[in-house]
Amino acid sequence: MVSKPDFLGGSGQDHFRPELRVESPEGELYLRFYISSSQEFALLATGIREVIELTPDRITPIPNASPLLLGTLNLRGRVIWVADLGQFLGESTALNTDRAEISVIAIEEQDTIVGLAVEEIDGMDWLDVQHLIPPTHVPDAMAPFLRGEWLIDAQKKKCLRLLDQTAILRSARWAG
């Protein structure tokens, strides 16, 4: 519960109105999104610098760069690389960049920022890592970047996979 801090004044014996009490949700806050193969993933919100919807012409292609990279983007005066997250994870389906807007998730660790282009942002959700299970039926190219998965629908074998943003940022795959 959230209570009134001491610095707001009063005698310290104030009684709070019920509408000021907030129950804290279980787990941590995550961003949910899809890649072009319709698989759903999540990233811990605290490692995300920004989520941007931008027109494809704001991403500047770089000749002779890795095929994983769509190009560069000026993010508040800083030039960052933008990658097709699906292809980075080993998917054969490339992100459709011939559309009005592309969703880019800027992840950050220390001084490193990378933009991950995804098919669609699904929203934010509170998820509990205690319910995380080891990933199943995962391609070898994707496995090093997963922390686990939440089983969403057992009958349809639908899961939400949790990505390890540190592993993504530190990957040697960027050099290829």
Image (cartoon, helix red, strand yellow):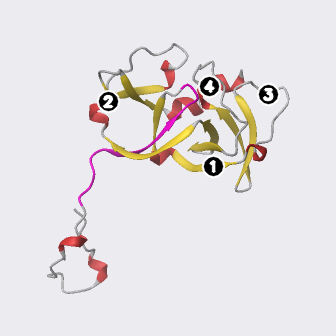
Which residue appears at 61% of the width and 43% of the height?
103
Sequence order check, earlier mark of 3 and 4:
3
Secondary structure of the residue carrying numbered label 1:
strand
In the rendered structure, which segment of residues is drawn in magenta?
23-37
Q: Position of residue 117 (x, y in %)?
A: 63, 37
Q: Circle 2 is placed at which residue position?
A: 132
Question: Circles 4 and 1: CB distance less than 8 Å?
Answer: no
Counting residues from the N terminus, which is met first, the one under dot 1 or under dot 2?
1
User: Marks 3 and 4, Cα distance to the nearest angstrom?
Assistant: 14 Å
Cβ–Cβ below 8 Å for labels 1 and 3? no
**Residue 53 disc label:** 1
Q: In the rendered image, which quarter is residue 80 located in?
A: top right
Q: Earlier in the sequence, mark 4 or mark 1?
A: 1
Sort mark 2 into few (<14), some (14-19) or many (20+) by Cα contacts within 10 Å.
Answer: some
N-terminal of the two: label 2 or label 4?
A: 4
- Secondary-structure class at tag 2: loop
Residue flagged by tag 1: what amino acid is it? Glu
How many other residues sit within 10 Å of disc 3, few (<14), some (14-19) or many (≥20)?
few
Image quarter (top left, top right, bottom left or bottom right) of the N terminus: bottom left
Residue 171: in sight, yes or no? no
As helix, strand or loop, the secondary structure at mark 4 comes to helix
Which is more N-terminal, label 2 or label 3? Answer: 3
Q: Nearer the viewer, mark 4 or mark 1?
A: 1
What residue is disc 4 on? 88
| Residue type, mark 2 in image | Leu
Q: Residues within 10 Å of mark 4 (few under 14, many from 20)?
A: many
Residue flagged by tag 3: what amino acid is it? Ala
